[in-house]
Image (cartoon, rainbow, N blue to C red):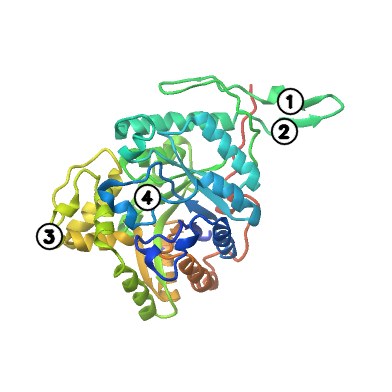
């Protein structure tokens, strides 16, 4: 194992009632507060008390009504992340905020503007989770009949990223001078037009929001397909990924970090943070009871609907015998890396459809660990010291219970081992993650 001098980084992925598909049915869930800003403020305060780097939120651009299963889950109901995080910034001082936004359905100028604004509002704690989106339902909310092709989405994402970062870099440090004596509010020599003319976008610029406190908001990515890994190698500063075993995680870590050099980047420029769903209690037996209790709350319609979505959505799995093996299904245009993961789990473990949907219902393909604080910390430490991860995106099954338990039980154990901070190191998200500052070169 490597002797790592840095500390484990932690994100908190905190949607509504919790990460498990049946979380909202649990008596300790906050199912009645998923649209209550005070509830999210408390979640943010708990994450900051636990010295987490960031509060992470995914985002969907459609209500997935396929097969009628949406009515049995709390997924997809919630606030638009940038709007929510602007409010949460007022009750926190150090916690970062990672908001998801799509390169397929957003406009690069508007996205650059709102994330630069969020970075100012938070004092340098904003991050953009760059996604290409994955569903025809979203396409049909944006005047399209179907979702664009996988390869085209990633070509578009490459150019979208260049436009957004070009707009962020259009302002030099010190451009906003507010010089009353000279009657100059903005130094025009330090503000630059982008004049981008590409395959998908024509953007004049400059942005009408000055350079943000971090130079740029942190860029996060979650794709694990070949195209996603290559985009991450060029653009990402944090990757949120789904791995099931230490060997798989090490291979992913090595592969993506190995792509950085071709883009003039070093391994330290990228933090890889797999998703982890921990069931933690003071004893292993109590933790297992937590897990078993939630699994029993999964409604078959909800489980089948989730599994159908994760495997591409082209086949209604409710028409199959749930106690039979997963049938051969076509590879779709949507979330290919997650489809591949689910298929591999079904084959390697010999799961029936019912066993498979119960397995994915909690963490949707992410790593699930169950145990005492020591057992949870042992597993996180092994992945970290084996260079399979730089940190983890924690996915509590039931909220607010399980973020409280992680902060109260696991964080002290990691600190005792010297693996985790005891205080925030910096003022910005970039500083706390150990990422280098982004400095704009002066115009020639």
Q: Are marks 1 and 4 in contact (CB under 8 Å)?
A: no
In the image, residue 289 lies at what x, y percent? 35, 77
Tell me the residue at 56%/49% (across/down).
Answer: 85
Q: Are marks 4 and 3 in contact (CB under 8 Å)?
A: no
The numbered disc on residue 218 is: none
Q: Nearer the viewer, mark 1 or mark 4?
A: 1
Element type where label 3 sits in the image: loop
Q: Nearer the viewer, mark 4 or mark 3?
A: 3
Q: Which residue is mark 2?
A: 174
- Residue 435 in view here: no
In the image, residue 8 lies at what x, y percent? 50, 60
- Mark 4 or mark 2, which is nearer the start of the sequence? 2
Count neighbours of disc 4 (C-alpha within 10 A) and say few if under 14, some if 14 to 19, many if 20 or more: some
Left or right, residue 318 beside residue 54: left
Spatial CA distance of label 1 from label 3 is 69 Å
- Mark 3 or mark 1, which is nearer the start of the sequence? 1
Q: Nearer the viewer, mark 2 or mark 3?
A: 3
Quick one: 91 or 421, which is closer to the camera?
91
Q: Is residue 381 above or below residue 213?
A: below
Q: Which residue is mark 1?
A: 187
Q: Which residue is mark 3?
A: 324
Q: Residue furthest right?
A: 181
- Mark 4 or mark 1, which is nearer the start of the sequence? 1
Q: Are marks 2 and 4 in contact (CB under 8 Å)?
A: no
- Mark 1 or mark 2, which is nearer the start of the sequence? 2
Element type where label 4 sits in the image: helix
Q: Which residue is mark 4?
A: 254
In the image, residue 177 lies at what x, y percent? 77, 31
Spatial CA distance of label 2 from label 4 is 39 Å
In the image, residue 282 lies at what x, y percent? 44, 79
Tell me the residue at 60%/42% (across/down).
Answer: 118
Q: Are marks 2 and 1 in contact (CB under 8 Å)?
A: yes
């Amino acid at each position: 194992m490597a002797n790592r001098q840095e500390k484990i980084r932690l994100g908190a992925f905190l949607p509504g009632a919790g990460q498990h598909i049946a979380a909202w049915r649990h008596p300790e869930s906050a199912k009645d507060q998923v649209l209550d800003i005070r509830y999210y403020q408390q979640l943010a305060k708990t994450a900051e008390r636990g010295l987490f780097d960031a509060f992470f939120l995914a985002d969907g651009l459609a209500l997935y009504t396929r097969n009628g299963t949406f009515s049995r889950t709390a997924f997809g109901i919630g606030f638009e992340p940038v709007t929510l995080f602007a409010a949460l910034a007022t009750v926190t001082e150090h916690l970062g905020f990672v908001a998801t936004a799509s390169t397929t359905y957003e406009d690069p100028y508007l996205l650059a503007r709102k994330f630069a604004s969020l970075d100012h509002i938070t004092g340098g704690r904003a991050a953009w989770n760059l996604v290409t989106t994955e569903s025809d339902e979203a396409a049909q909310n944006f005047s399209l009949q179907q979702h664009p092709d996988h390869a085209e989405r990633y070509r578009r994402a490459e150019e979208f990223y260049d436009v957004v970062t070009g707009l962020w870099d259009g302002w030099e440090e010190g451009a906003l001078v507010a010089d009353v004596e000279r009657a100059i509010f903005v130094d025009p020599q330090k503000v630059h037009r982008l004049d981008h003319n590409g395959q998908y976008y024509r953007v004049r610029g400059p942005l009408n929001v000055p350079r943000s406190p971090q130079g740029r908001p942190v860029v996060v990515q979650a794709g694990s397909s070949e195209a996603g890994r290559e985009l991450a190698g060029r653009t990402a500063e944090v990757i949120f990924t789904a791995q099931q075993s230490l060997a798989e995680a090490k291979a992913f870590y090595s592969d993506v970090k190995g792509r950085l050099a071709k883009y003039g980047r070093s391994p330290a420029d990228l933090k890889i943070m797999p998703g982890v769903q921990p069931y933690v209690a003071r004893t292993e037996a109590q933790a297992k009871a937590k897990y078993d209790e939630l699994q029993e709350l999964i409604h078959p319609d909800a489980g089948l609907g989730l599994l159908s979505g994760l495997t591409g959505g082209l086949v209604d799995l409710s028409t199959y015998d749930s106690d039979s093996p997963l049938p051969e299904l076509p590879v779709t245009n949507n979330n290919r890396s997650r489809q591949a993961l689910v298929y591999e789990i079904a084959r390697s473990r010999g799961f029936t459809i019912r066993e498979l949907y119960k397995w994915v219902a909690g963490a949707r393909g992410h790593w699930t660990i169950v145990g005492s604080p020591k057992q949870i910390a042992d597993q996180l430490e092994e992945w970290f010291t084996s260079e399979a991860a730089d940190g983890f995106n924690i996915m509590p099954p039931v909220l607010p219970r399980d973020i409280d338990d992680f902060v109260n039980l696991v964080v002290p154990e990691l600190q005792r081992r010297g693996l985790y901070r005891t205080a925030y190191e910096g003022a910005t998200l970039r500083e706390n993650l150990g990422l280098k500052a982004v400095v704009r070169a002066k115009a020639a």
